[in-house]
Amino acid sequence: MRIVFIGSLGVIVRDLRKGRGLYSKDLGLPLKKPRGGDFLYTQKLPGSRYFGVWPLSEAARACFGRSRWPGNRPVPQMFIEFEVGDRSEVASAARELRSRGHLLLHEPRTDPWGQTVVRFQTEDGLLVAVSYVPWMHRPQRKALNTKRRRRASPRR
């Protein structure tokens, strides 16, 4: 398995309203709720390509196909998604993880928004994914090029 970067990182909350209060209002993170979605996210937080606030019910639905987290699994408080170089590597990563004794929460799949993903959970409860999200592999634009930055700097 060849991880190329951390694609997503976020918290899992039992109550999205309270999560919004803490992460958006109290901490001032620029979170938004997508149309038709039941989670919060931003792609505008320096140091992260994607930071999310994911309701536990949505995490359960993504992993188990139902809105309740199973009582025999630790309740996760965070998730992290490691990106691989292409879509086919997700299935290879799943085979490798399984061969090393990890119990996959679901088989590799491609979600409607294009993410190919497989998830497992650590003994400590962290929800871990190996995924490929096509748009995350496009070159990122730099906010300012070097020449513009120099011109904008005050002269001494």
Image (cartoon, grey):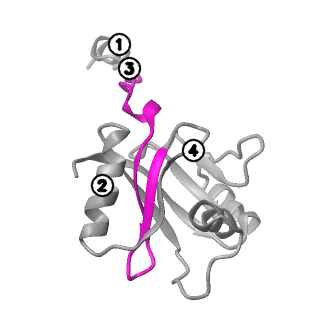
Image marks 3 and 1: residues in contact by CB distance under 8 Å: yes
Q: Nearest the camera: 25 or 87?
A: 87
Number of disc labels: 4
Gap between marks 4 and 1, in whole Å? 40 Å
Instruction: Give percent across and percent down for residue 90.
Output: 36, 48
| Magenta-drawn segment | 116-144
Gap between marks 2 and 4, in whole Å? 17 Å
The amino acid on which the numbered mark 2 sits, given as a three-letter code, is: Ala
Identify the mark nearer the N-term, 3 or 2: 2
Element at label 1? helix
Residue 109 shows in the view: yes
Q: Quadrant of residue 15?
A: bottom right
The amino acid on which the numbered mark 4 sits, given as a three-letter code, is: Asp
Mark 4 neighbour class, 10 Å CA radius: few under 14, some 14 to 19, many 20 or more: few
The amino acid on which the numbered mark 3 sits, given as a three-letter code, is: Leu
Q: Is residue 69 above or below residue 137?
A: below
Seen at 51% across and 59% down, the residue is: 10
User: Circle 1 sits on which residue?
Assistant: 148
Instruction: Give percent across and percent down for residue 8.
Output: 45, 51
Quick check: is 4 in the magenta stretch?
A: no
Mark 2 neighbour class, 10 Å CA radius: few under 14, some 14 to 19, many 20 or more: many
User: Circle 3 sits on which residue?
Assistant: 144
The amino acid on which the numbered mark 1 sits, given as a three-letter code, is: Arg
Identify the mark nearer the N-term, 4 or 1: 4
Gap between marks 3 and 1, in whole Å? 6 Å
